[in-house]
Image (tube, rainbow, N blue to C red):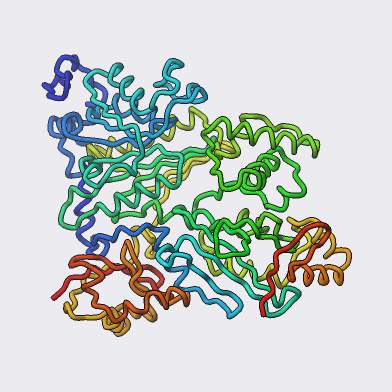
Amino acid sequence: MATAEVLTNGNSTLCDWHDRYYHVDQILDRPGPRTDPSFMAGDGVKEFLRNQCKILVIGAGGLGCEILANLALSGFKDIHVIDMDTIDISNLNRQFLFRPKDVGQPKAIVAAEYIMKRVPGVKVSPYYGKIQDKDDAYYMQFNLVICGLDSVEARRWINATLVNLVDPENPESLKPLIDGGTEGFKGQARVILPTVSSCYECSLDMLNKPTAFPICTIANTPRLPEHCIEWASVLEWPRVQGDKKMDTDDPEHINWLYTVASARAKEFKIEGVTWSLTQGVVKNIIPAIASTNAIIAASCCNEAFKIATSSAAYLNNYFMLIGTDGVYSYTFEHEKRDDCPVCGGESLDISVPRTWTVERLIEMLVEKQDIQIKKPSLSTASSQIYFQAPPQLEEATRPNLEKQVFDLVPDGGEITVTASTLPFSLFLRITYS
Amino acid sequence: MIKIWSMKKNEDAAAKRKPKTSAAQIRVQKDLTELDLPPTMKTHFPDPADLLNFTLTITPDEGMYKGGAFTFSFVINTNYPHEPPKVKCTQTHLLHALDRKIYHPNVDLEGNVCLNILREDWKPVLNLNSVMVGLQYLFLEPNADDPLNKEAAEELRKNRDQFVYNVRQSMRGGNIKGVQYNKVTVQ
């Protein structure tokens, strides 16, 4: 039986009433036959979960609201949340931490305040902005990262950032990433152990491609309201507005598209072009279903809890849910891809004499028996060193062949190598002897 | 916390840190340096340090567009290869030039191109080489079934000889049905 612990986090001492965590503690107080040997039943694990574990939630939207509530109620007490959006009236049907008075306010800040008010003793630190604003040191402070995002780009960014954060000398640098996602009745939850298990980039080819209509259909034979809207946004906007960038968050722009699409629809006797459909098509909005979000967020939070406490085996590593045709779910181990540009590839530490030219380095790579490269192209993160093709770039980078590697790459610097004979990319870390 | 680190011990190679080059950047490097273009296609980088913005010029050596030079701008965003490159027909090396009119059933007067792998059939396994080969194919086999320039498509379907004549006219900078086309012939 749990007794109220003395906690040091914020005002939790005052708020931790007797048996607050009675039910959760049933799991944490004693090991079971299948719990991990590292499980420290009792005070050890509770101390970690409630006083030490720092978790980052990315996204405070449909999934994020659920995730924040679930984490707070299962005993996580140091939660950070990032979201770059403000609250729109259309969010209120499912993003239950927000009220009509909050419309226009930053999601992260309102969500954090709500959770702190509702769940005593929990500290939620919001950041209203982009994940890209934060540096490695920021991400390094967390034990776990959990994502409820709606963008492939943001997922790829955080995935690559966490993979790059892994430092072979420092176990703390490996941050498990739990990623949730939903689309209507479909959803997925997955656990990514950066560099250890399959990462987000490894599975990029599993994504549904965004709906796109053939451009000639849009131009000539529209049949659907969507065709008229795409005509307005893909063909008419650049024709009429020139280089002016379309901002899908600007109601004026949506208005313009709606007017143009409606005229087109009238001409072809197509019904169904509405303002909200226009917005939906250009922003690629998929109707969000609150209960799908609830299932996926709950699943993500269970994994966060299991990973943080070792109280049960965690998801290995991909759970998918398809609710469009009855209910189907499947859990499988997505495998790491050897040629994944983020977590795959080979990496080599090589030491070269300070006097070596780029040409000499390339010769050495070609001669190296264990990598078998022909015609390698080399670059650093910021510039090209030598490209075998296309001709213009070969010519532009050819003068580098005679330069010393030392003049182009600092000691400890990295070079990305690609070659057609190499099914993955190769990373070299250069030190000088 | 679970002890993930113990799982890592066995995988030395994977434990090494990777450079901070974005996945899109590496993929573009791989695509570009492995381009295997025939003499009829040539890339041009306005800024050689910027791999994400360039043009491709196609000079068909057979078919009805033989003797012309057709330039396409490529704009690749950081979501490549999840998203296809944005390709437009443009008649200069400037990426946003206004004069881009060519007479082709699958290219409209704004420079939009109807090629399935640029939109609805794009897949990340395709690469820049496939797109370029696809573009060249449009000049060998213009397709009247997917029109973007309706008049040109109509002509191609109804009267192939007249279409071929129009193509020659347009390539010399001629006027067809009130539209002034850009001169694209090369010596």
Left or right: A101 as drawn, with respect to B39: left
Left or right: B21 as drawn, with respect to A431: right
Left or right: B161 as drawn, with respect to A59: right
Q: Is residue A44 above or below residue B69?
A: above
Residue A165 placement (x, y as % from top left): 25, 52
Q: Is residue A104 above or below residue B147?
A: above
Image quarter for residue A85?
top left
Tell how many labels. 0
**Residue placed most toward the observer, A200 or B138:** B138
- Considering every residue shown, the one lying at the far right of the view is B158
**Residue placed most toward the observer, B13 or A155:** A155
- Give the residue displayed 38% in from the left and 81% down from the top: A374
**Residue placed most toward the observer, A117 or A387:** A387
Left or right: A381 as drawn, with respect to B161: left
- Give the residue displayed 17% in from the left and 51% down from the top: A171
Quadrant (top left, top right, bottom left, bottom right) of the C terminus of chain B: bottom right
Residue A276 placement (x, y as % from top left): 61, 29
* Res. A173 in view: yes
* Res. A365 in view: no
Residue A210 placement (x, y as % from top left): 56, 47
Quadrant (top left, top right, bottom left, bottom right) of the N terminus of chain B: top left
Image quarter for residue B140?
bottom right
- Give the residue displayed 41% in from the left and 56% down from the top: A202
Residue B101 placement (x, y as % from top left): 70, 60
**Residue placed most toward the observer, B99 or A231:** B99
